[in-house]
Structures are given as structure tokens and as C-alpha cells.
Image (cartoon, rainbow, N blue to C red):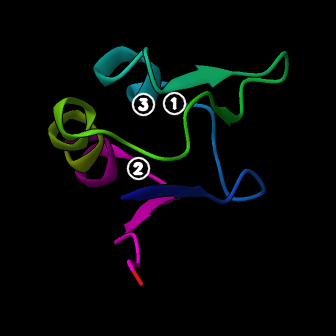
Amino acid sequence: MHVNVNAESCIGAGQCVLIAPEVFDQSDDGTVVVLVESLDDPAQAAVREVVRACPSRSISLTESRSG
């Protein structure tokens, strides 16, 4: 899985950092920063929760393509 963010729509609520601090941080202006874009299995559940919790819907996931 791959984490996608839209920092322009981020409102800086910080839910992503609270739920998955190993994957997300916040910049000086409070917008989301992705620390790890490709997720291993343990991080996927937490990031799925982040996607549901993000009030601005600035975070999404895409399935990794194999081939």
C-alpha cells in the first residue's frame, strides 16, 4: 500500500500524527508530512484508521501494483 496526501487541503488537525506517528508528522505550519510512503502490513491498519479520521479527507491509500 502507498500513502497519498494532499497537503494543500490539510487543515492541520493532527489526527494522523496521533493515530500513526510512525508514518506521519506535521510541518512547521501544521500540515501533514508523510514519513513512510510505502506501508508494511503492521502500519496498514493504523493508516486505514487515519484515512477515516482525517477531517479534511487529505489522506488516501492506493494498493501497490505488482507486476
Residue 59's tag is none
33 sits left or right of 1 in the view: right
How far is mark 1 from mark 3, CA to CA?
8 Å
The amino acid sitting under disc 3 is: Cys
To which residue does mark 3 refer?
16
Residue 67: % across, % down: 42, 84
The amino acid sitting under disc 2 is: Pro
Range of magenta residues: 49-66
Do callouts 2 and 1 mark residues in contact (Cβ within 8 Å)? yes
Residue 55's tag is 2
Q: Quadrant of residue 25?
A: top right
Q: Quadrant of residue 22?
A: top left
Q: Earlier in the sequence, mark 2 or mark 1?
A: 1
Residue 3: % across, % down: 49, 53
Label 3 Cα neighbours within 10 Å, binned few <14 / some 14-19 / many ≥20: many
How far is mark 2 from mark 3, CA to CA?
10 Å
To which residue does mark 1 refer?
13
